[in-house]
Amino acid sequence: MHRKPSHPCQNGTARIAATSRWAVLAILSAALYSTTADPALADRTPLSSKEIERTIEGKRIYLQTPFGGEFPLFYQRNGVVDGSGEALGLGRFMAPKDQGKWWIADNQLCQQWQEWYDGKKQCFILERIGETTLYWKRDDGLEGEARVGQ
């Protein structure tokens, strides 16, 4: 005899969906987290709003991950940002792609995803540490490096 689950969490699909949501947040946080900041970065100056716009608008930004891979984000000129975790294998845990919006406020790059991070707004201070390398620090203290592509 087949019993119907008495609670939605007993349903295997619901349990996988709930687990997947937390798993993807953990993976994205780990993917975005780099090693402890280099003390030499303390003397760097954050990019201005205009510098941020020139640096990222219409470009792909590749966030370095502790796994040795890169997490690509495409900052379109129309204020849309596309992200894909397919190369990192996020498809096993959730929809590996998301889209959101980006804007610049108070010399910070801000973005808000439709699904990732439960759609919460995040803002970043950016500093140039090489011709194509950026240091970023998110408003919650998470920090790392990224490569500017085309």
Image (tube, helix red, strand yellow):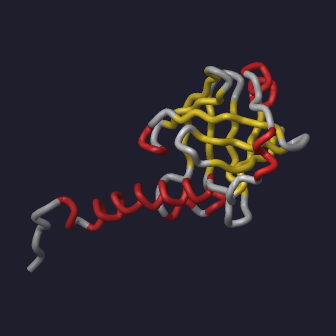
Q: Nearer the viewer, residue 114 or 35?
A: 35
Is 76 rendered above or below residue 16? Answer: above
Residue at x-position 75% and y-position 44%: 135
Is 34 rendered above or below residue 130? Answer: below
Check the picture and name the quadrant holding the N terminus: bottom left
Q: Nearer the viewer, residue 1 or 79?
A: 79
Q: Is residue 143 left or right of residue 145?
A: left
Percent position (x, y) of residue 72? 70, 47
Question: How many labels sit on residues?
Answer: 0
Residue at x-position 67% and y-position 34%: 125
Percent position (x, y) of residue 107? 68, 23
Residue at x-position 55% and y-position 54%: 29
Percent position (x, y) of residue 144? 69, 50
State which quadrant residue 98 falls in: top right
Residue at x-position 80% and y-position 30%: 55
Percent position (x, y) of residue 57? 75, 27
Q: Is residue 48 left or right of residue 23?
A: right
Furthest-bottom residue in view?
A: 1
Is 26 rendered above or below residue 59? Answer: below
Q: Is residue 43 left or right of residue 20?
A: right
